[in-house]
Amino acid sequence: MVEPTTQHLQPGQIRDANRAMLVAACKVAGAQVVDLGIARDTEGHVQACLEKAIKQQVDVLVTTGEAPQKCFKSILWKTCQRCFIQ
C-alpha cells in the first residue's frame, strides 16, 4: 500500500484508496479523526501504530486492508489490557 499521491506504482503496489473516504465519513459522523497513516506489513510497525493510537487515547480504531487477522489479534492481545474483537 502506498500513498494516493504516488506517481508510479511498482509491481504489487496499490494506492491507499480508502483513507480519504473513511476520514470524511468519520468527520461527518462527528468524530475527531487521528490519521495514523499506513501501517507497514510488519508486526512491529502495526504494534507501534496501535501504541500511538492508545497514547492519543482514541475511542475507536478503524482499520482496513490485508493485515492478517491472526497477527493483528495477537498484537491487540499483547498491547491492550482489554479488547473486543469482532
Image: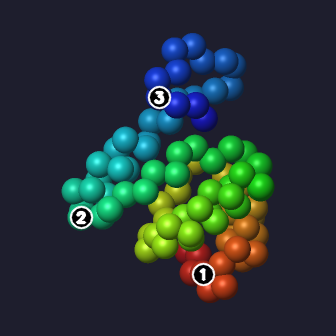
Quadrant location, the C terminus: bottom right
Q: Where is residue 60 drawn, in percent x and y?
A: 44, 70
Q: Classify residue 81 by image quadrant.
A: bottom right
- Identify the residue at the far bottom of this view: 82
Question: Does 39 sit above or below residue 32?
Answer: above
At label 2, which amino acid type do we have?
Gly
Could you say whether the residue bearing mark 2 is in a helix, strand or loop?
A: loop
The number of numbered badges drawn on the structure is: 3
Depth check: give the residue in front, 66 or 58. 58
CA gap between label 1 and label 3 equals 31 Å
Q: Residues within 10 Å of mark 1 (few under 14, many from 20)?
A: few
Query: At label 1, which amino acid type do we have?
Result: Cys
Residue at image coords 43%, 42%: 18
- Left/right placement of residue 62 relative to residue 2 reads left
Asked if 82 appears above or below 58 in the picture, the reply is: below
Q: Which residue is mark 2?
A: 30
Disc 1 designates what residue? 83
Q: Residue at x 46, y 70 (%)?
A: 58
**Horizontal side, residue 84 vs residue 46: left or right:** left
